[in-house]
Image (cartoon, rainbow, N blue to C red):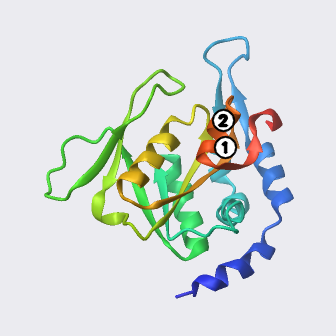
Amino acid sequence: MRRRSDHRLMYSDVRLDEVKSGLRRAFTWRGDRTDERWYADVTGWWRRPELLAGLGPALARLFADRPPTVVLGPEASGCLLGPLVALHFGVGFVEVCKNRGTPVDSDAWLRRTTPPDYQDRHLSLGFRRRLVGSGDRVLFVDDWIETGGQAHVAHLLTQDAEATWLGAATVVDALDSARVRRHLNVRSLLHVREL
């Protein structure tokens, strides 16, 4: 098992400009931009092994000055990217579940409901209480941040667990609010204008 101090040596293996360029090349907008139904298609990111291999270290580099003890990631893309970042830091990963029903086990869960997201939905987010504790430094990881609702709730869940919030590492920042970006300490590889 790698010692935590070893993660800093791996940053030199990943060229950030190459990762960003690869992200832009593998990204597609689907639909007509004048149509309400156009959307960001990030599936090309997962198909390219060299890009996938660089994403964990690139996102981790955003928080090299504040290494976490645990990484949180929401279903679905956060559960792909979060473990890549966690492995890079040599720490564990916790899945933030969406809209899970009542658990059938006896574990205690921390849960919160999001403000309206980009599709005007309210989501119930949560994780098992025993997975994040008061000594943890938490990094939230996802592919895209637009309203900040899920990251905000992850921040509140981190506070509920009496852990320390480090911030949110995302591939794309599509936030309109600089206040939300500062409050959540959002650091991203790309801004949506670069796509």
Residue 75 at least partly seen: no
Q: Amino acid at mark 1?
A: Arg
Q: Amino acid at mark 2?
A: Arg
Disc number placed over residue 179 in the picture, else none: 2
> Measured from the top left, where is residue 169 in percent x and y?
63, 53
Q: Looking at the image, is 31 positioned above or below residue 108? A: above
Disc 1 and disc 2 in contact, CB within 8 angstroms: yes
Q: Secondary structure at mark 1?
A: helix
> Measured from the top left, where is residue 126 in percent x and y?
34, 47
> Measured from the top left, where is residue 52 in percent x and y?
66, 59
Q: Which residue is mark 1?
A: 182
Foreground pick, 25 / 19? 19
Foreground pick, 95 / 31? 95
Q: Check the picture and name the quadrant holding the C terminus.
A: top right
> Measured from the top left, where is residue 186 in percent x and y?
65, 47
Q: Looking at the image, is 147 positioned above or below residue 81? A: above
Query: How many numbered marks are there?
Result: 2
Asked whether, in this view, residue 131 is left or right of residue 46, the answer is left
Asked whether, in this view, residue 89 is left or right of residue 24, the answer is left
Q: What whole-number distance in Å separates the C-alpha atoms at marks 1 and 2? A: 5 Å
> What residue is shown at x 82% (from left), y 38% (from top)?
194
The image quadrant that residue 95 belongs to is bottom left
Q: Looking at the image, is 45 positioned above or below residue 27? A: below
How many residues crowd around disc 1 within 10 Å: few (fewer than 14), some, or many (20 or more)?
Answer: few
> What residue is shown at x 61% (from left), y 72% (from top)?
88
How many residues crowd around disc 2 within 10 Å: few (fewer than 14), some, or many (20 or more)?
Answer: few
> What residue is shown at x 47% (from left), y 57% (from top)?
72
